[in-house]
């Protein structure tokens, strides 16, 4: 499955431009920022999931030697109570401010209530411990069902959510919406097979290895400078401006290298606190680093909750689908339930559908995006039910999916009509893969049992805004300035697209990620958009550069511009074959023939072209202990066009492994009073190298018609199928349907006991 | 305020002499006192391996060792892995095999893998996975990291 066009740079595997700094320890991440006269901040956090602040006494902290500034919510500027668009999602700054530092009430354990800046982290920690808070502990609700119960506590005072266009009568409903097409009642009435189940998932964390951080200066001219590791420097600027009540032009955000994000480093947490502490310290720089428990308890994990799906089938066609999706948003509204609703039926062409989405406020950290946010949850439900249908009707799971696959022209469950998508090609590649066709010995003879599962997954991907500047060096290289944080090799994938246009090598482009003062607005590295959209901006900038250089060639040769052509990396004259210059040759002449040449490219892309991933999983279960080992795993995905195949494979593998952790082990283990009791890596237990086999990859390329090189978003689809693929494999091995994730040894043993009586 | 401890140690072949608070971890000492920020913090409690360094010939999580403990000892960190002659073969293999995405785990993996290959140059895949299980990577799924170590073995 190869894209039709031949490329020179695209599809090759050059060494990434920032690689050397990252294998030598030289790359500067957020925690490595050190400024002269810098102070160290630390945050006091609520020990309760839900509690009113009667009073705070900071006097003992203020009196401690080495303490320079102490702040509480009283020091937060009053922010507007309105919704502002952030590109990927929207923000209410009054909520954001209350989230950054609790005004009157802690809404989750870990909610900040005060912060200190001191001459060392240790002094700051001791000072924080000396702050006294008089708490009135309130009843908490930590699951969607608890928060919707008649006796549920009111978590967000004064909040009235939207319930299908009406004011909600329940206090903790963030929102309830519905998408409906066709005639759902008739669809089910006509169905000969109907299967319905509810699937529950626990809250999980992105688990990036680098904790959040921020180093800020708020000076006497009301200028704020911030260094932080973020997925989007401009989005940080917008959030800071809203929370600090400053014009964006007074804020400069410098993105450092970033140690993982997966959606979790779009919101800000400690950054405004560092800025306010800096202001209170007379403009000294203040650095705040989170520790690991703070990351788990007080940043934005992805929601838990449940998804209930009912499917109706007639003559091997799914003709009706009904979904009810309920996510716990955390202490403030805004879970990714909207995205979940866009994804739930997207792998299938179903005439009659209804989707209900509920965003529920609970006493847990406010959720954020996590790689294809919401889509893994809904895939768990629908892909398992599809498997059950195949089992009941004795159908081949891939053929049934193919017979019902969404394709160009299919209406997605929330309305839009699919453009050219690669769902069918991805399923076919899985069907034809070595893994799917290899026999599996279900009883390997050691007392364990094995099973194989498959699942499909979809993510819509986003486009949004990006800017790129190019300037030509006289040695024939090109500087590329961009605003997209490089979280996993995008300097390379963006530079390669410019190099392809310019007819030079990837190594001849020198990409730099710069601060918000130094490049045009660029949205977050998220939504699988960076190689697609910032790559598109680089493509445009490179085209503009060629136009400039074409004009320059005409001047040099003294011929009309339309006489000059650029082909195969060479400028030449249409009429005089003697007149020809390579990119490098013309670059060397620029300074003598009119001066430097540079260009810009900017895009605002409404559409992105969705991506599909089909995963195949073999696993082996020890029925004595319930321990499950993944023994073979293959990720198949339509990527449109793989710019740098190694990093495309890396995304597929990394996403698959995060999904494997989610399926088998990871969860926020909550006590009844809303305490996360496993807020360390030891107890949260993400997959290690020893837990995993090789992750095989099959790249499918169905070019995205709206991108010059056919790129589709790659990063997110691979986390969508794993939970369902593993659930289906467990069923294949044991004949047991586990409808609650994680499907850990305890749950497997319980289910086995129930089955065997 | 407690008195600081006087420490003399060799880091990456270089003599260092400094004062450190007795409660400071080796990780904090490297990063905050000596400005060797190539060694990273992911958890500060011995569970991620981002802070891995070699101490007296063994790999340790530097967040679980006190700075004062290294007096008279020898430490090797990521900053000492490449030389004037060039990159260590593992560093080169990590680049060629795309064994890093965000790169925050990379220094720890490189120090751990170097220690493995020095002891067991012929370690098989399972042994490599076992040895590196103390280093968490959330981006790569480990596949390309394992392949980079195997490539280094093959070209040694
Ligand atoms: S920081 Fe030392 S093991 Fe994580
Ligand atoms: S590359 Fe990001 S944690 Fe390993």
Image (cartoon, coloured by chain):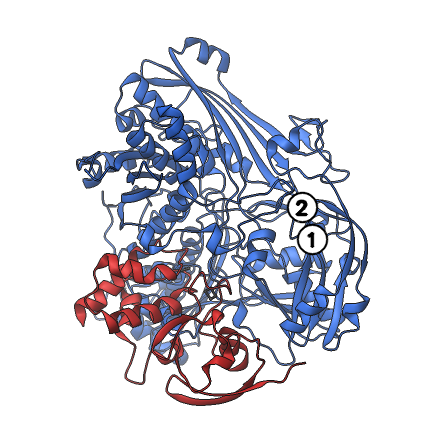
Q: Is residue A695 left or right of residue A226?
A: left
Q: Tell me the subunit letter for badge 1.
A: A
Q: In the image, are marks 2 and 1 on the same chain?
A: yes
Dot 2 surroundings within 10 Å: few (below 14), some, or many (20 or more)? many
Residue drawn at x 69%, y 53% is A46
Report the front residue among A178 and A160: A160
Report the front residue among A488 and A505: A488
A627 is higher (above) or lower (below) than A644? above
Dot 1 surroundings within 10 Å: few (below 14), some, or many (20 or more)? many
Report the front residue among A612 and A455: A455
Residue drawn at x 27%, y 62% is B97
Q: Is mark 1 within 8 Å of ligand 1?
A: no
Q: Position of residue A616 (x, y in %)?
A: 29, 38
Question: Circles 2 and 1: CB distance less than 8 Å?
Answer: yes
Q: Tell me the subunit letter for badge 2.
A: A
Q: Is residue A405 left or right of residue A471?
A: left
Report the front residue among B36 and A602: B36
**Chain red in the figure, letter:** B
The residue carrying mark 2 is A49
């Amino acid at each position: 499955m190869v894209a039709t066009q031949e490329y020179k740079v695209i599809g090759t595997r050059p060494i990434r431009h920032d690689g050397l700094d990252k294998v030598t320890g030289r790359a500067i991440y957020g925690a490595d920022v050190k400024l002269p006269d810098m102070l160290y901040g630390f945050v006091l956090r609520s020990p309760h999931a839900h509690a009113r602040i009667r009073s705070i006494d900071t006097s003992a902290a203020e009196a401690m030697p080495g303490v320079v500034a102490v702040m509480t919510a009283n020091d937060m500027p009053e922010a507007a109570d309105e919704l502002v668009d952030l590109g990927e999602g929207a923000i209410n700054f009054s909520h954001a401010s209350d989230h950054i530092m609790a005004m009157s009430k802690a809404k989750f354990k870990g909610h900040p209530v005060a912060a200190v800046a001191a001459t060392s982290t240790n002094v700051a920690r001791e000072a924080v411990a000396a702050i006294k808070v008089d708490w009135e502990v309130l009843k908490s609700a930590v699951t969607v069902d608890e928060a919707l119960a008649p006796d549920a506590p009111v978590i967000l005072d004064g909040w009235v959510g939207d319930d299908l266009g009406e004011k909600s009568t329940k206090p903790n409903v963030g929102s309830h919406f519905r998408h409906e097409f066709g005639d759902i009642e008739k669809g089910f009435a006509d169905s000969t097979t109907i299967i319905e189940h509810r699937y529950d998932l626990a809250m999980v964390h992105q688990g990036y290895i680098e904790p959040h951080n921020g180093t800020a200066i708020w000076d006497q001219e009301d200028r704020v400078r911030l260094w932080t590791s973020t997925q989007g420097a401009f989005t940080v600027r917008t959030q800071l401006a809203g929370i600090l009540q400053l014009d964006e032009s007074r804020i400069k955000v410098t993105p450092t290298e970033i140690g993982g994000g997966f959606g979790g480093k779009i919101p800000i947490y400690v950054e405004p606190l560092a800025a306010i502490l800096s202001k209170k310290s007379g403009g000294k720089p203040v650095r705040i680093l989170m520790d690991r428990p703070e990351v788990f308890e007080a940043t934005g994990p992805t929601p838990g909750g449940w998804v209930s799906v009912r499917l109706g089938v007639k003559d091997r066609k799914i003709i009706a689908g009904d979904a009810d999706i309920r996510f716990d948003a955390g202490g403030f509204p805004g879970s990714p339930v909207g995205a979940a609703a866009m994804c739930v039926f997207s792998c299938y062409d179903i005439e009659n559908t209804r989707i209900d989405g509920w965003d529920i406020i609970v006493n847990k950290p406010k959720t954020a995006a996590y790689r294809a946010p919401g889509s893994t949850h809904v895939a768990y439900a629908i892909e398992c039910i599809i498997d059950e249908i195949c089992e009941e009707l004795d159908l081949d799971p891939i053929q049934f999916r193919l017979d019902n696959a969404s394709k160009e022209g299919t209406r997605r469950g929330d309305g839009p009509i699919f453009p050219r998508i690669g769902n069918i090609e991805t399923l076919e590649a899985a069907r034809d893969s070595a893994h799917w066709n290899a026999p599996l010995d279900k009883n390997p003879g050691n007392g364990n049992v094995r099973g194989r599962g498959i699942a499909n997954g979809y993510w819509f991907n986003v486009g949004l805004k990006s800017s790129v500047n190019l300037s030509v060096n006289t040695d024939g290289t090109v500087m590329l300035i961009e605003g997209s944080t490089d979280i996993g090799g995008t300097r390379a994938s963006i530079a390669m697209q410019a190099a392809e246009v310019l007819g030079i090598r990837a190594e001849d482009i020198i990409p730099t990620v710069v601060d918000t003062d130094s490049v045009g607005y660029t949205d977050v590295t998220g939504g699988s958009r960076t190689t697609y959209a910032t790559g598109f901006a680089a493509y445009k900038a490179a085209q503009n550069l060629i136009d400039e250089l074409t004009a320059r060639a005409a001047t040099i040769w003294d011929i009309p511009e339309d006489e000059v052509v650029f082909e195969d990396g060479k400028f030449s004259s249409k009429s005089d074959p003697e007149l020809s210059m390579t990119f490098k040759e013309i670059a060397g002449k620029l300074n003598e023939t009119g001066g430097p040449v540079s260009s810009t490219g900017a895009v605002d892309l409404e559409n992105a072209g969705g991506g599909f991933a089909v995963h195949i999983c073999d696993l082996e279960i020890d029925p004595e202990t319930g321990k499950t080992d993944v023994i073979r795993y293959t990720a198949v995905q339509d990527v449109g066009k793989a710019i740098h195949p190694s990093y495309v494979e890396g995304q597929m593998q990394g996403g698959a492994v995060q999904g494997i952790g989610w399926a088998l082990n990871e969860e926020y283990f909550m006590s009844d009073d809303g305490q996360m009791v496993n807020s360390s890596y030891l107890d949260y237990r993400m997959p290690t190298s020893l837990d995993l086999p090789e992750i095989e990859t099959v790249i499918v390329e169905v070019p995205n018609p709206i991108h010059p090189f056919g790129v589709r978003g790659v990063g997110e689809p691979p986390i969508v199928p794993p939970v369902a693929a593993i659930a289906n494999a467990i069923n294949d091995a044991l004949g047991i349907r586990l409808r609650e994730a994680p499907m850990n040894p305890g749950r497997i043993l319980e289910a086995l006991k129930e089955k065997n009586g | 305020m407690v008195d600081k401890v006087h420490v003399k140690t060799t880091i990456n072949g270089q003599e260092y002499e400094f004062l450190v608070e007795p409660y400071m971890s080796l990780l904090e000492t490297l990063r905050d006192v000596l400005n060797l920020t190539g060694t990273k913090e992911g958890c500060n409690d011995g569970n991620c391996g981002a802070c891995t360094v070699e101490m007296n010939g063994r790999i340790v999580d530097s967040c679980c060792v006190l700075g004062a403990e290294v007096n008279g000892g020898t430490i090797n960190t990521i900053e000492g892995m490449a030389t004037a002659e060039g990159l260590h073969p593992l560093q080169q293999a990590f680049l060629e095999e795309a064994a890093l995405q965000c790169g925050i785990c990379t220094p720890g993996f490189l120090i751990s893998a170097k220690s493995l290959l020095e002891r067991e140059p012929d370690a098989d895949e399972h042994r490599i996975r076992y040895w590196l299980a103390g280093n968490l990577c959330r981006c790569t799924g480990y596949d390309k990291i394992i392949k980079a170590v195997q490539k280094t073995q093959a070209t040694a």
